[in-house]
Amino acid sequence: MSSMTYSSPFPEDFVFGVAAASAQIEGAAFADGKGESIWDRFARKPGAVAHGDTLDVACDHYARFDEDFALLASLGIKNYRLSIAWPRIYPQGDGALNEAGLDFYRRLLQSLHRHGIKPWVTLFHWDLPQALEDRGGWPVRGTVDAFARYADTVVKALSPLVTDWITLNEIRCFTWLGYGAGTKAPGRRDSEAVVNQTYHHALLCHGEAVRAVREHGGAGARVGLTDNCDVCVPVTETEADIAACKAWFLERNAHLLGAIHGKGYPQDWLDRVGDAAPQVQPGDFDLISLPTDFLGLNIYTAHYVRAGKDGAAYEQLELPPNYPRADSPWLSWVPQSIYWAPKLCQELYGHTEIYITENGCGYNADTVVNGEVLDLHRRDFLRAYLRELHRAVADGVPLKGYFLWSFIDNFEWEDGYERRFGIVHCDYATQQRTPKLSARYYADVIRTRRIL
Ligand code: FCB
């Protein structure tokens, strides 16, 4: 350790990057043949999105990607996780291909390469073509067939420019929140059986994407899922509370990570859901459990769990009202989440290569004053989580990289533009970009590979 630094470095090959997603930053929602997505439609539903914000313009990244990548490069950022908008490629979900959509992503990926930035490409980050929703959406098995075709097309066309692929982003959010809770597009409140069917179809799409990368990705192509597993941390890091965490984690993640790992739905989950179990066809799990190269985890928060009383496997604690959180109501500060989620995935399912594909915090009113945004709250959030990440690496958890959400303030789904997650400020009236203090801080962490 040099005399000027106070922490041990991250490994030389540890990947630091930033993340964003098509629908949240691109804008150009109806340009060059793009079809309507379920989020374009949902945003127009009265009361669905804060302030009636739409995705029509967003950060205008569609027109400004080259400048945006120059800015990333100037911050020393060499890895960027992005997603492809399915409705740009197949405006009707299947049917006619829109070559202009593929050309856009070719130009974008070429620009990334020119700026020395490696792309990590997610095939689906929630922007389902509305035409598929009109035919039933995620509850319908035909959506899986349409996705398989889309995945084949994209991987074939873009594989010369991409080696690292992510199949789907956060299955829970576009299934349960979209079809059960109704807080995300398409805003439906369907039965438990319908929601369980959407999970199953999403798992099948994950498998189709793995297959597509193996068939068309070329030599060296790699693929994995990005999951937002339900996370818990032990109240105290003792054997009893950790055992309670393991029981909680297996139960809460049974239908997604558990199903992929177990090559079938765990029996205790099937017993719990009873008649609401999804319909499974022979061979489904051969596809769903195809081997992947890595697991992506989006980690923001966690529940606190301790040893159960009177023979219960665990006890989950309620957070007190004054427990610290970001402005996003769901985002309680639990830095240990980024330690325990990958550790439990290693211990319970045997994952050997894990990336944090998102982590960050959303606040309102990050304002530019004299050309600066002093987001010390975000800097503190990052530092606290990075310390736990570093501890996990030191403890032998197979963490290979970390992507900060997000590169730039953007359309935060039902919270619209009010909620800012960026390390770069976006002035939506002028499209001016201003790196915040947190961007400078993160740039220094990347440069030195140390928590500063
Ligand atoms: C995740 C989403 C991402 C972003 C962050 C804040 O759930 O994957 O698009 O909205 O939350």
Image: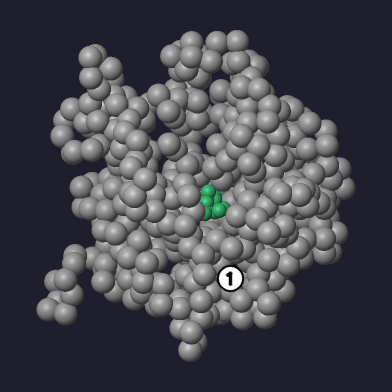
Q: Position of residue 295 (x, y in %)?
A: 44, 43
- Tell me the quarter of the picture where residue 419 sits: bottom right
Numbered disc 1: secondary structure = helix
Label 1 sits on what residue type?
Leu
Q: Residue furthest bottom?
A: 370
Whether the residue under disc 1 has CB within 8 Å of ligand 1: no
- What residue is at 18 percent from the left and 27 percent from the top? 240
Q: Residue furthest front?
A: 321
Q: Position of residue 142 (x, y in %)?
A: 77, 30
Q: Position of residue 421 (x, y in %)?
A: 50, 63
Residue 84 seen: no
The residue wearing badge 1 is 112
- What residue is at 65 percent from the left and 55 percent from the top? 50
Q: Is residue 24 left or right of residue 444?
A: right
- What residue is at 49 percent from the left and 53 percent from the top? 328
Residue 439 seen: yes
Quarter of the image with the C terminus in it = bottom left
Looking at the image, residue 420 lies above or below residue 447: above
